[in-house]
Image (tube, helix red, strand yellow):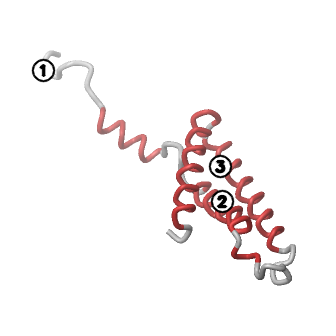
Amino acid sequence: MIGGPVGAVTTVVVSLLAVGLVRLRGTATTARVLVGVAGASAMLGMAMLSTGPWRAPGGYVGHSFLVQFPLLLALVATGLAVLPFGRSALLARASQRLTARRAGSSTNA
């Protein structure tokens, strides 16, 4: 919500990429990649901000898109890294109970 339309599009795109990575490599690798993306993009955003936030000729550079986008990406990747992309044991048990069928009839023993 805070990111506006750019934040919404970034969240959808990164989520789709994460789901695709889960299918290709699994949940553990996806979580590691998301943490790496979050760390790298946060460092990039901080490095860009530290180059001269108040001494820039055009004023404060912290409001520019090029500084804010890597930090937005870090925030989205961090949020996605903590989500359980795989099926949890609780969901697996609930699914098995809902779809369980007997092989035969109990009246024809």
Q: Position of residue 61 (x, y in %)?
A: 76, 76
Q: Position of residue 103 (x, y in %)?
A: 27, 20
Image check: 28 left or right of 16?
A: right
* Label 3 SS: helix
- How packed mark 1 is, by other alpha carbons closer than 10 Å (few <14, some 14-19, many 20 or more), is few
Write down the residue under mark 2: 73
Sequence-first disc among 2 and 3: 3
Q: Secondary structure at mark 1?
A: loop
Q: Quadrant of the C terminus?
A: top left
Q: Is residue 109 left or right of residue 11?
A: left
Amino acid residing under circle 1: Thr
Q: Which labelled disc corresponds to residue 83? A: none
Q: Residue 55 occupies which quadrant of the picture?
A: bottom right
> How far apart are labels 3 and 1 at the CA level?
50 Å
Q: Nearer the viewer, mark 2 or mark 1?
A: 2
Position of residue 78 relative to residue 54, above or below, is above
Determine which residue is flagged by label 3: 31
Q: Which residue is tagged 1?
A: 107
Q: CA distance from mark 2 to mark 3?
A: 15 Å
